């Protein structure tokens, strides 16, 4: 039977060539194209002279960046689009390009290109075992520097969306560089936090916390959250980590939170969680491919897991558009 309307091939083509856009962005970040355009517009020849590189490849790169809408071009002169100015210039307070330079390029991309192989072998993207991965100081640092660049903005957003002010002691489980603790503590002068993560990660966390002048309010505890005892607190945060774990682990973690929290204490789950129909959002669907042993979970299903562990008033709200969700629940 003839199809009533021909399916549009553009969808398939855009998906299949998406890697080219990623590579153009990574090249421009490494070559400092965005930084050089921060204070002055220039043509391709001027950019090539500034970078000390041949003009033709630079012109090709700048045209590609313009097609991606990261640069604007008028009469052969290039300037930054607002998104590039805000997020891709290293001196911008909202810069998160190091996430792509370090974590995406070195930790995720080499495995995404062989996703079929990993799926056939029942293996995870990047790390089959986080503890073994983070045991390598160089890998731990590369991943965590990248994650920090992305999590700083997410942390600031979460601190605006969730009212941390009733709480005094947060426990930031698998907290990485403590970006979420830093943002929450900066906005809530009475809050303190302890970041629990692997030893090679918290070595960097300590450096970052000291640089931010928060060493008196944010502590670290090196260790594997599946094995060590957790610090005491009235707020337990799991940011961008539970999606890596199985449902069995979610339930074990939530029951452990319930046992440790005082009445009125709360759990926050911030992660790339799916919509209720499991049809999106796009970035949540894609990032779920990085799970070690879990399968995608919706915000609503995560809320049910919290309630099944004894928590009440579970609420689901979107944090980073198209990407993350916050699920909160309280101990009665
Ligand atoms: C995607 S990062 C998120 C870090 C931080 N929560 C944030 O949102 O910026 C995941 C973190 O989970 C940590 N992690 C994973 N499994 C862990 C475990 N079993 N014990 C401690 N940390 C763990 C990793 O080392 C990494 O820092």
Image (tube, rainbow, N blue to C red):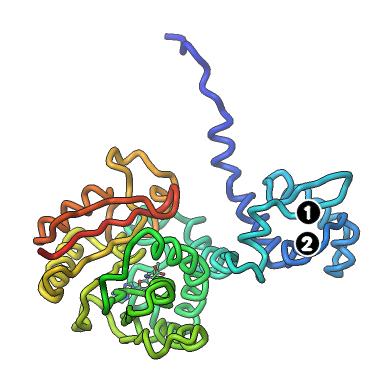
Residue 62 appears in view:
yes
Q: Residue at x 64, y 50 (%)?
A: 20
User: Of marks 2 and 1, which one's residue comes earlier in the chain?
Assistant: 2
SS type, badge 2: loop
Binning the other alpha carbons within 10 Å of mark 1 as few (below 14), some (14 to 19) or many (20 upward) gives: many
Q: Which mark is residue 37?
A: 2
Between 285 and 259, the one lying in front of the other is 259
Binning the other alpha carbons within 10 Å of mark 2 as few (below 14), some (14 to 19) or many (20 upward) gives: some
In the picture provided, is 210 more to the left or to the right than 20? Answer: left
Which quarter of the picture shows residue 279? top left
In the picture provided, is 3 more to the left or to the right than 243? Answer: right
Q: Where, quadrant-wise, is the C terminus in this rendering?
A: bottom left
Q: Which mark is residue 146?
A: none
Q: Residue at x 42, y 89 (%)?
A: 215
Which x, y percent locates residue 296? Answer: 30, 51
In the picture provided, is 143 more to the left or to the right than 319? Answer: right
Q: Is residue 284 above or below residue 186?
A: above
Q: Which mark is residue 79?
A: 1
Which quarter of the picture shows residue 179? bottom left
Q: Is residue 66 above or below residue 106?
A: above
Which x, y percent locates residue 169? Answer: 26, 79
Q: Is residue 149 above or below residue 125?
A: below
Q: Where, quadrant-wise, is the N terminus in this rendering?
A: top left
* Separation of residues labelled 2 and 1 (CA atoms): 6 Å
Between 34 and 52, the one lying in front of the other is 34
Which x, y percent locates residue 121? Answer: 35, 58
Between 88 and 16, the one lying in front of the other is 88
Q: Residue at x 68, y 55 (%)?
A: 24
Which x, y percent locates residue 189? Answer: 38, 79
Quadrant of the displayed image that contains ligand 1: bottom left
* Contact between labelled residues 1 and 2, with CB atoms less than 8 Å apart: yes
Between 25 and 72, the one lying in front of the other is 72
């Amino acid at each position: 039977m003839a199809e009533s309307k021909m399916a549009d091939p553009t969808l398939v083509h855009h998906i299949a060539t998406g890697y080219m856009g990623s590579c153009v962005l990574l090249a421009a970040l490494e070559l400092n194209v965005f930084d050089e355009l921060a204070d002055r517009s220039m043509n391709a020849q001027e950019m090539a002279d500034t970078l000390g590189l041949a003009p033709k490849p630079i012109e090709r790169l700048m045209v590609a960046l313009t097609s991606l809408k990261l640069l604007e071009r008028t009469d052969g002169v290039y300037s930054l689009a607002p998104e590039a100015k805000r997020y891709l210039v290293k001196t911008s307070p909202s810069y998160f390009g190091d996430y792509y330079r370090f974590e995406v390029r070195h930790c995720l991309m080499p495995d995404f290109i062989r996703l079929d192989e990993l799926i056939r072998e029942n293996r995870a993207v990047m790390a089959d075992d986080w503890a073994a991965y983070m045991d390598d100081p160089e890998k731990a640092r590369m991943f965590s520097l990248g994650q920090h660049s992305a999590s700083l903005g997410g942390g600031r957003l979460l601190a605006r969306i969730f009212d941390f002010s009733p709480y005094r002691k947060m426990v930031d489980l698998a907290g990485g560089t403590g970006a979420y603790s830093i943002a929450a503590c900066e906005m809530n002068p009475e809050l303190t936090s302890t970041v629990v993560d692997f030893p090679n990660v918290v070595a960097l966390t300590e450096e970052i916390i000291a640089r931010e002048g928060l060493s008196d309010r944010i502590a670290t505890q090196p260790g594997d959250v599946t094995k060590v005892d957790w610090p005491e607190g009235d707020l337990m945060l799991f940011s961008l980590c539970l999606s890596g774990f199985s449902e069995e682990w979610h339930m074990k973690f939530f029951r452990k939170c319930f046992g440790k929290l005082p009445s009125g204490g709360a759990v926050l789950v911030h992660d790339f969680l799916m919509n209720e129909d499991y049809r999106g959002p796009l970035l949540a669907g894609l990032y779920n491919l990085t799970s070690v042993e879990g399968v995608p979970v919706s915000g609503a299903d995560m809320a049910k897991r919290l309630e099944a562990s004894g928590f009440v008033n579970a609420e689901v709200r979107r944090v980073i558009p198209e990407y993350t969700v916050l699920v909160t629940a309280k101990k009665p």
